[in-house]
Amino acid sequence: MAKPEKPKPEKPLEGGNMTPVSRAGDQVFREAGPWTPTIQRLLAHLRDQGLAWVPEPQGWTKDGREALAYLKGKVPTYPLATWVYDEAVLVQAGRWLRELHDATADYTDPEATWRGIPRQPHEVICHNDFAPYNMVFRDHELIGVIDWDFAAPGPRLWDLAYLAYRIAPLMRPENPDAPTISIDLGARLTMLLDAYGSTASVPELLSTIVARLEELASFTRTHGTARKNDKLLADAENYRQDAAYLAGLLR
């Protein structure tokens, strides 16, 4: 009789500042909450719509954690490698965000419980953290997007604005996360808006980024996890200063 296969050992994954995440073999486990069934249904819907770059939901572990298929690849961390700013990555990210939004424009879930804050108008389901640090790459090619816990209904521009902030990027020069390479921000913004197919103006985009960052700074500072996490508190201060910097550009 064959011996039963031993469970694969788990190891923590980087990130997961708000929710602990670990991996064992081809599965990822993360702490579940009231929102988890909603996110599992959302991911199943997206995959049914042909979005193969979304993690496959795999239910729950015996101890009640959420299980997802592991997307094999590299998730960038700051300071980002220069290849993350390749134009091909920016264009692909913009197109994928549009795919997500189009796939959820008519999505309904009567039993939904969202961890993220739903926003008006409810045009689509926003990822709410569509950024390089939640993107999976293989050989410098974008192959997936992870960390969907804070997805919630909202306007398209709310999601697109945060992606622009992170991938254009639209940060003050003193931000430790700002790239050290020379980039043409105007051209990259136009490229991102075109890739998404957005008709938003640059001032409208910047105004939305300011509002997004101001709220994110407040949320991060007041979240229970942040009070014991110096990195999250530093992130909150960066958001606040970047919001003020961008607001100054609009004056």
Image: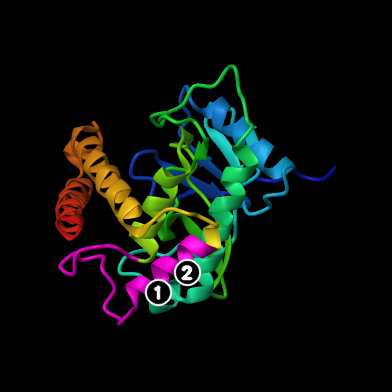
Residue 187: mark: 1
- Compared to residue 90, the image places residue 95 above or below, namely above
Residue 27 shows up from this direction: no
Q: Residue furthest top?
A: 111
Residue 114 shows up from this direction: yes
**Most common SS among magenta residues:** loop
Q: Is residue 189 magenta?
A: yes
Residue 45 appears left or right of 186: right
Q: Quadrant of the C terminus?
A: bottom left
Region in magenta: 169-194
* Within-10-Å neighbours for mark 2: few <14, some 14–19, many 20+: some
- Compared to residue 46, the image places residue 138 above or below, namely below
Q: Quadrant of the N terminus?
A: top right
- Going by the numbered disc 1, the residue's amino acid type is Ala
Residue 78 appears left or right of 237: right
Indicate the secondary structure of the residue bearing disc 1. helix
| Foreground pick, 45 / 62 | 45
Q: Are marks 2 and 1 in contact (CB under 8 Å)?
A: yes
